[in-house]
């Protein structure tokens, strides 16, 4: 069964990581849907029981790779969607605010229900998409985005590292709890890429862009290789279980 | 022999100002005492009708203060439920000027209310903003932190604002018997539990309104001597009365007291102006056409009429600010470039 691994800009590290692995799996392809900004609005719809991408960039990229604009349930899909938590912690408000649970004196306490509402809204369309894929019988799993980077510009601008990590952890937990309810497997980053505080280790930072634009957000090829090893290991497990079920 | 009613402007005669013109075209019904300029920092509070004024100030490019802004990432449809973006602070509806004065007293630390938390089904409510957080706060600590931050920010309004806009709502209210601290809603309606031994009904008199407003003006000018004030009266009638009278009679009393008090104050202070939103909606020449079928809430057309009347006297300071295009976050550009560099897409 063909596996398509696709999603936001973090698929780039997976693509580059996979390209450096040997041997190359012949049944796994990585391509991007579009940047994480698309996750904040509806990007798909159900047509005749199938999930079809409606965001033009998602549809265009998927059609170019697969020949269709739909999520074909005959294939297996890995989605790199839903844990791009920087959308949440990069809000300028966090320069002077903290989640109420860890709020420091003199900073604005953001109530827990308010933050939960913001997170729910951020994840709404990805979870709707995944639930529809589930209902359409698409075999799938979700791949995590990298942990936050300690050199993210929001920290330089005044956000507390503890706040960034708190928001990241809460958002990931909210998301993975929802995935568990949908019975969708989730592949988390391996422990070796995360430092003691909870940030991505600096050796896995992606370099700045070729045009000089600073990147305080993405992971590099080494990270991509480690994550792809996790993905391929997961797929081997799925194959083994499928094979056992077929012969047993 | 001449007399004072000769040679007055058309707006002074009922026939020329009202009877013989469309109610939509009442010329000079609002003659501002002062201009609201582009550099003026504006704060707004009051009853629910004040939300419209706040929104319009923002949309029309005025310098509207919001000391507790909504997070940029919070969807617009969530904001009002958390009391964000409605006024110049997250203080919810302030129906009486006494409530306004006491809010600043609490912010200044000179008022310590008998109760600062209502617990209900494991959730915690601010008695002075019972609807500010859907289903209350998760813990007492969370509520206390939020109130402390809220009051610290409210206090800055008096320092920052050049113009304070307040919409008077009604004269009826509920207060702690112990010290007269006023509540925005009757305990037991939105949150809390009604206890006749602790809370009492109040119906502010003309004297109360005038004195409380003078107190507010003094309080504000002690911080900011040049502050100006724009007062309006909500045309929305009472939803219910606890006065024992018919709600229409009680509503008429409430609005009449407020109208008389605000008129007196506007005549008394050079820096106080009155905008007739009440007359533009609720006076009989309007034939109730700006109310919804319940004859209480104001229709969007009515709100638009009021706002257009107000802002035609205060032209938009900077064209082009309305509908300003949102710039892409730099991180989104980095994401696009990560895809482009790797995939060539």
Image (tube, coloured by chain):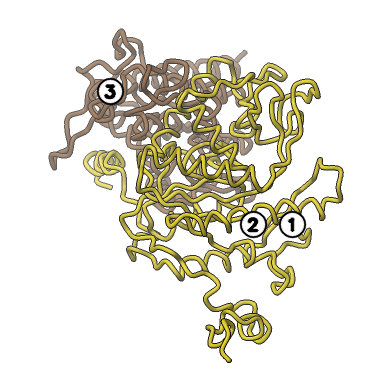
Chain colours: A brown, B yellow
- Residue identified by numbered label 3: A149
Image position of B6 with respect to A76: above or below = below
- Residue identified by numbered label 1: B296
Closer to the camera in the image, A124 or B208: B208
Closer to the camera in the image, A84 or A11: A84
Mark 2 element type: helix
Residue B306 placement (x, y as % from top left): 57, 65
Closer to the camera in the image, A53 or A65: A53
Furthest residue to the bottom? B1
Residue A89 placement (x, y as % from top left): 37, 29
The answer to whether one can see residue A73 in this image is no
Furthest residue to the front? B1
Which numbered disc, 3 or 1, marks the residue closer to the eye?
A: 1
A232 left or right of A122 in image? left
Residue B294 placement (x, y as % from top left): 78, 58
Q: Quadrant of the N terminus of chain B?
A: bottom right
Closer to the camera in the image, B239 or B143: B239
Q: Which residue lies at the image location 30% right of the left edge and 10% below the top edge?
A: A192
């Amino acid at each position: 069964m063909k596996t398509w691994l696709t999603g936001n800009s973090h698929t780039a590290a997976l693509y580059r990581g996979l390209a450096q692995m040997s041997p190359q799996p012949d049944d796994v392809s990585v391509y991007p849907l579009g940047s994480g900004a698309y996750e904040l609005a509806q990007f798909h719809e159900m047509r005749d029981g199938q999930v079809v991408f409606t965001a033009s960039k998602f549809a265009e990229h998927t059609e170019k790779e697969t020949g269709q604009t739909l999520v074909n349930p005959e294939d297996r899909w890995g989605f790199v969607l839903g844990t791009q938590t920087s959308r949440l912690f990069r809000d300028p408000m966090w320069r002077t605010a903290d989640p109420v649970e860890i709020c420091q004196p003199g900073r604005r306490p953001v109530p827990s229900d308010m933050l939960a509402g913001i997170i729910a809204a951020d994840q709404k369309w990805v979870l709707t998409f995944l639930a529809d894929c589930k209902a359409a019988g698409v075999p799938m799993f979700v791949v995590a985005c990298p942990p936050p980077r300690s050199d993210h510009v929001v920290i330089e601008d005044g956000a507390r590292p503890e706040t960034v990590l708190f928001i990241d952890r809460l958002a990931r937990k909210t998301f993975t709890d929802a995935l568990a309810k949908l019975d969708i497997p989730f592949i988390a980053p391996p422990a070796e890429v995360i430092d003691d505080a909870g940030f991505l280790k600096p050796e896995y930072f992606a370099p700045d862009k070729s045009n000089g634009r600073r990147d305080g957000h993405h992971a590099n090829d080494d990270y991509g290789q480690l994550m792809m090893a996790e993905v391929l290991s997961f797929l081997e497990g799925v194959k083994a279980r499928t094979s056992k079920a077929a012969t047993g | 022999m001449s007399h004072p009613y000769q040679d007055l402007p058309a707006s002074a005669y009922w026939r020329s100002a009202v009877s013989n013109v469309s109610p939509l075209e009442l010329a000079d019904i609002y003659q501002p005492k002062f201009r609201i300029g582009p550099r003026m920092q504006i704060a707004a509070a009051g009853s629910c009708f004040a939300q419209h004024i706040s929104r319009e100030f923002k949309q029309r490019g005025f310098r509207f203060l919001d000391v507790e802004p909504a997070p940029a990432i919070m969807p617009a449809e969530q904001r009002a439920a958390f009391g964000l973006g409605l006024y110049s602070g997250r203080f919810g509806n302030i129906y009486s000027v006494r409530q306004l004065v006491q809010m600043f007293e609490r912010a200044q630390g000179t008022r310590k209310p008998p109760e600062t938390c209502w617990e209900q089904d494991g959730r915690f409510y601010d008695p002075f903003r019972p609807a500010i957080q859907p289903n209350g706060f998760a813990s007492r600590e969370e509520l206390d932190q939020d109130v402390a931050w809220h009051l610290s920010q409210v206090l800055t309004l008096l320092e920052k604002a050049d113009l304070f806009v307040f919409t008077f709502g009604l004269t009826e209210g509920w207060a702690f018997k112990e010290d007269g601290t006023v509540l925005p809603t009757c305990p037991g309606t939105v949150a809390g539990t009604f206890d006749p031994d602790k809370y009492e009904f109040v119906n502010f008199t003309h004297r109360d309104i005038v004195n409380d407003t003078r107190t507010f003006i003094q309080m504000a000018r002690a911080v900011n001597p040049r502050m100006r004030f724009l007062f309006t009266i909500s045309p929305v009638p009472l939803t219910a009365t606890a006065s024992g009278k018919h709600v229409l009679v009680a509503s008429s009393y409430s609005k009449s007291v407020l109208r008389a008090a605000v008129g007196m104050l506007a005549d008394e202070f050079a820096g106080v102006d009155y905008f007739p939103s009440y007359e533009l909606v609720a006076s009989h020449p309007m034939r109730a056409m700006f109310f919804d079928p319940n004859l209480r809430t104001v229709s969007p057309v009515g709100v638009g009429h009021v706002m257009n009347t107000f802002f035609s006297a205060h032209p938009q300071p900077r064209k082009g600010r309305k509908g300003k295009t949102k710039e892409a976050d730099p991180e989104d550009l980095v994401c696009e470039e990560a895809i482009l560099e790797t995939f060539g897409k």
